[in-house]
């Protein structure tokens, strides 16, 4: 292949700004806190930091209800703080990726306040307004909001309903309106001019809706204990063909600034996900592959997923993998602490760009949130169904001291901190050769130094039971990645031909490194190996 781009070689680290580091002592993370933590990210060995929203917002959805796309919320700092963050990141060789929220705004945004002021407002068509259903006087169709309830809210002042894919306080923009498109593309230019290296586009599949506003069909597979949103198939409210033209416009802006990265947040089946690469590579560079998050932690299921994903990729498309994010349960809570080490090796040796969620590298897990401490509107709107996102958003664990070094000991953190932060934290694990943090750092260093493990080819190796194995090859070097996703010993053997001969260069348990392999690969429970094969 030709020379790779930085985001093909690199690893992205996802920061939730409220929870990374508090520099002001108010119990909420901020931009200066992120800047203070950049040295740690450089030491860890990642290549880019993706920062969730920090824009002015009433915080009904903690920053995804934006009231000004071109400023910083005072809780997080100032534009000058952002500029300082970018300057320090670039000094350290780190890229800065921002969350871009084009689907909706806050209902406190001046655009929406003007839009709802009257039916004759010049910005009326900037949002999706519809008359009540003439038969019922209720909402114009049956579309549902992701956070519960109808996706339409009635405005008494103008006698129409407005559409919101999420909260009523998050009205959706009308991307069929030319002025809306130009305004939101201008937001990209604003941050690119300030040094942003890329964007992760929030809620991308929701961006365009059916222009006839047809009812969504019922979901025959719906289970009542799940999210009420899933009762309908969102055939007319998401993933519309017209969204790809909007993406091409975004790419056109980014491409004018050189090598910039566009990531799309997309929870879609693989066949629909890969369509977002666009015809001829004109879509997002990385349609986010979330499929490792909900999949059963089973070697055969994961092997099948990798095979289907690799087979579906368009020519020239670059893959990507994610184990967790601010909306889904942490990997350590899903698979346990021992398998979280194996999962780290999987994430950082698969072909494609990996994203690490802050704190996963020190073994952070979901934190139980008492009812009086719940902050997430989803849990408040649809309680008791396990949909709340607070448990995976708790403060970063920097040290064993009170409040985990996230904020001063006399401050109250915005969410509770894990009780085991005295063991699982950066300071304690940094010099421990057996810690999960050390494992992450060594995996990242090996990946960076080894083209075969970053941009090299991928080939599956036949395996059975709890074994998962594949080959990575590049620059004349071959590596076997052998993983045991079970709690019993497992043996992997080549299916035909000569035996494997090589040397273990990295293990999830460091006592085997340097061991010579001659024949089969024996794996202990919950163990992963990277083996450099001899020619």
Image: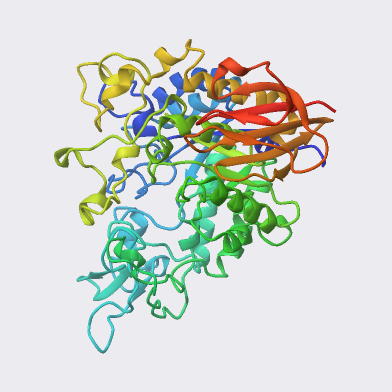
x%, y% of residue 431?
48, 10
Q: Is residue 196 visible?
A: no
Q: Determine the residue positioned at 31% across, 60% down.
A: 227
Q: Is residue 193 left or right of residue 448?
A: left
Side of 150 where 398 appears, left or right? right
Colouring method of the image? rainbow
Q: Is residue 496 above or below residue 410?
A: below
Q: Give me the residue at 63% from left, 59% from top.
A: 248
* Residue 471 in which image quadrant: top right
The one nearer the camera, 410 or 108, is: 410
Q: Position of residue 446 (x, y in %)?
A: 66, 23
Q: Nearer the viewer, residue 194 or 206?
A: 206
Residue 57 point in image, percent of width and height = 32, 44
- In the image, what residue occupies the spot 52% across and 35% down? 343
Q: Is 196 situated above or below 448?
A: below
Q: Quadrant of the C terminus?
A: top right
> Residue 404 sits in which quadrant?
top left
Nearest the viewer among 282 and 317 is 317
| Percent position of residue 49, x then y | 52, 32
Q: Quadrant of the N terminus?
A: top right
Say above or below: 216 vs 252: below
**Residue sitting farthest toward the top:** 431
Q: Residue at x 41, y 70 (%)?
A: 125
Residue 139 visible? The answer is yes
Residue closest to the far left: 372
Counting labels gives: 0
């Amino acid at each position: 292949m030709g020379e790779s781009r930085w985001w093909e070689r690199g690893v992205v680290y996802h920061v939730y700004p409220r929870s990374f580091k508090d520099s002001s002592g108010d119990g909420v993370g901020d931009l200066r806190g992120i800047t203070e933590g950049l040295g740690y990210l450089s030491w860890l060995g990642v290549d880019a930091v993706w920062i969730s929203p920090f824009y002015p917002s009433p915080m009904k959805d903690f920053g995804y209800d934006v009231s000004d796309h071109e400023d910083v919320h005072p809780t997080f700092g100032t534009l000058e703080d952002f500029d300082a963050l970018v300057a320090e990141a670039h000094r350290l060789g780190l890229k800065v990726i921002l969350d871009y929220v084009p689907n909706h705004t806050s209902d406190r945004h001046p655009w929406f306040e003007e839009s709802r002021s009257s039916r004759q407002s010049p910005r009326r068509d900037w949002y999706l307004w519809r008359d009540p259903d003439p038969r019922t006087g209720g909402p114009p169709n049956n579309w549902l909001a992701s956070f519960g309830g109808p996706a339409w809210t009635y405005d008494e002042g103008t006698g129409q309903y407005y559409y919101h894919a999420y909260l009523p306080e998050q009205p959706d923009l009308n991307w069929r309106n030319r002025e809306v498109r130009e305004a939101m593309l201008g937001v990209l230019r604003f941050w690119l001019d300030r040094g942003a290296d890329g964007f992760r586009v929030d809620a991308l599949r929701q961006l365009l809706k059916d222009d006839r506003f047809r009812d969504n069909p019922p979901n025959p597979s719906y289970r009542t204990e799940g999210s009420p949103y899933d009762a309908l198939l969102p055939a007319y409210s998401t993933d519309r063909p017209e969204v790809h033209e909007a993406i091409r416009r975004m790419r056109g802006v980014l491409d004018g600034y050189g090598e910039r990265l566009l990531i799309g947040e997309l929870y879609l089946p693989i066949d629909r996900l890969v369509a977002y690469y666009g015809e001829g590579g004109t879509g997002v560079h990385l349609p986010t592959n979330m499929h490792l998050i909900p999949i059963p932690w089973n070697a055969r299921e994961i092997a099948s997923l990798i095979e289907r994903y690799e087979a579906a990729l368009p020519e020239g498309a670059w893959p990507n993998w994610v184990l967790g994010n601010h909306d889904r349960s942490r990997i350590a809570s899903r698979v346990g602490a021992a398998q979280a080490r194996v999962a780290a090796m999987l994430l950082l040796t698969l072909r494609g760009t990996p994203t690490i969620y802050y704190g996963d590298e020190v073994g952070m897990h979901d934190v139980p949130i008492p009812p009086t401490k719940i902050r997430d509107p989803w849990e408040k709107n649809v309680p008791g169904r396990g949909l709340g996102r607070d448990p995976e958003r708790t403060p970063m664990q920097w040290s064993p001291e009170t409040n985990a070094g996230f904020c001063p000991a006399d401050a109250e953190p915005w969410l509770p901190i894990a009780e085991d932060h005295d063991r699982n934290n950066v300071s304690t694990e940094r010099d421990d050769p057996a810690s999960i943090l050390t494992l992450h750092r060594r995996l990242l260093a090996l990946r960076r130094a080894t083209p075969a493990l970053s941009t090299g080819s991928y080939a599956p190796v036949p395996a059975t039971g709890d074994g998962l194995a594949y080959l990575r090859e590049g620059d004349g070097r071959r590596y076997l990645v052998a993983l045991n996703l079970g709690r019993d010993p497992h043996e992997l053997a080549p299916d035909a031909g000569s035996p494997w001969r090589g040397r273990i260069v990295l293990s999830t348990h460091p006592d085997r490194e340097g061991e010579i392999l001659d024949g089969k690969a024996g794996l202990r429970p919950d163990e992963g190996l990277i083996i450099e094969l001899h020619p």
